[in-house]
């Protein structure tokens, strides 16, 4: 009869030591995100601008402090967003967060929390566009009716002359109906093709998907900071230089000084670009 613990009793403690050593060897979530950001050549300011996550929260997460996130659901959402911004798969980090903070929360999708503001119903004012279209249709109809009536009067006068009456017998000379002038086309972004050579003109089109963009002039002053939805267009012009940051460069089409920029940007990539006057060249 043996005294003390048997070898079988000691095995669970050995397994726990191995697991503890494995946990110590695994880098923390914040460390992984920080190393990936540095490897991508991005600053905390760049990541904050691209993801709309405040800089103090980015600094806190990279220090493994998730308190400023405001709860597990928001912490998971921030981890997912920051991982995608630095080209990482967020799932292993989310699994690690669950292991370290009490498992996964209830399966509530995080996307509606961040998109609730976007899908909130908006107040709609009067539909002025429909009213303007109706007014234009009415004017066109009136002009057409007037032209038709003028054409009938001219035909009647010609018939009277053919039957033997003299042109002087008519009550009034036949008047020529003036053809309405063609409406002048409204200026559009296509006029960039004739952009002035003494300036730099940049047109940004969200062709494939929405994307955050920021633009600065030659003095470094911010002239735009926001999100373009799919199909939206923004045009920037400066005397010498336009600086861009594209949050999702693969979704963007660029036209600089009337010329389309043929760049094979990857979807989800963050690009910092500078354009000057003349033939476009990215800096």
Image (cartoon, rainbow, N blue to C red):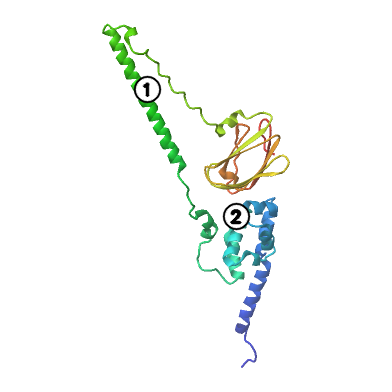
Residue under the image location 58 percent in, 63 percent down = 74
Residue under the image location 65 percent in, 65 percent down = 68
- Say if residue 100 shows up in the picture: yes
As drawn, the residue found furthest toward the left would be 163
Mark 1 crowd level (few <14, some 14–19, many ≥20, 10 Å Cα): some
Residue under the image location 63 percent in, 82 percent down = 10
Tell which of 48 and 187 is nearer to you: 187
Residue 202 x/y as whole percent: 63, 37
Find numbered disc 1 in the image and state the secondary structure of the residue it sits on: helix
- Say if residue 205 shows up in the picture: no
Residue 20 x/y as whole percent: 66, 73
Measured along the vertical axis of the image, is residue 148 above or below residue 44? Answer: above
Residue 16 x/y as whole percent: 63, 76
Q: What residue is shown with label 2?
A: 84
Q: What residue is shown with label 1?
A: 147
Q: Distance from label 2 to label 1 (Cα)?
A: 64 Å
Q: Quadrant of the N terminus?
A: bottom right
Find numbered disc 2 in the image and state the secondary structure of the residue it sits on: helix
As drawn, the residue found furthest toward the bottom would be 1
Measured along the vertical axis of the image, is residue 26 above or below residue 164? Answer: below
Q: Quadrant of residue 84?
A: bottom right
Measured along the vertical axis of the image, is residue 163 above or below residue 50? Answer: above
Q: Quadrant of the C terminus?
A: top right
Tell which of 150 and 200 is nearer to you: 150
Of pointers 2 and 1, the one earlier in the residue sequence = 2
């Amino acid at each position: 009869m043996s005294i003390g613990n048997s070898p079988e009793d000691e095995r669970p403690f050995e397994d726990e030591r191995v697991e503890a050593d494995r946990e110590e060897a695994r880098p923390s979530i914040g460390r992984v995100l920080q190393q990936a950001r540095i490897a991508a050549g991005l600053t905390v300011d760049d990541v904050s601008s691209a993801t709309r996550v405040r800089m103090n929260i980015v600094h806190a997460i990279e220090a493994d402090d998730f308190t400023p996130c405001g709860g597990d659901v928001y912490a998971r959402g921030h981890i997912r967003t920051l991982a995608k911004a630095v080209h990482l798969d967020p799932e292993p980090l989310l699994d690690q967060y669950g292991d370290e903070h009490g498992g996964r929360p209830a399966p509530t999708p995080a996307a509606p929390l961040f998109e609730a503001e976007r899908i909130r119903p908006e107040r709609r004012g009067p539909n002025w566009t429909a009213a303007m279209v109706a007014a234009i249709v009415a004017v066109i109809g009136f002009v057409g009716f007037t032209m038709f009536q003028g054409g009938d009067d001219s035909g009647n006068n010609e018939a009277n002359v053919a039957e033997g009456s003299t042109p002087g017998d008519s009550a009034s000379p036949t008047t020529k109906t003036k053809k309405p002038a063609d409406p002048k086309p409204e200026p559009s972004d296509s006029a960039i093709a004739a952009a002035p050579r003494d300036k730099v003109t940049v047109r940004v089109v969200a062709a494939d998907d929405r994307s955050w963009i920021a633009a600065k002039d030659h003095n470094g002053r911010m002239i735009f900071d926001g999100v373009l939805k799919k199909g939206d267009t923004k045009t920037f012009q400066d005397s010498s230089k336009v600086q861009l940051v594209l949050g999702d460069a693969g979704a963007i089409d660029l036209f600089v000084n009337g010329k389309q920029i043929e760049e094979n940007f990857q979807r989800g990539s963050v690009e910092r670009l500078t354009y000057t006057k003349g033939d476009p060249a990215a800096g």
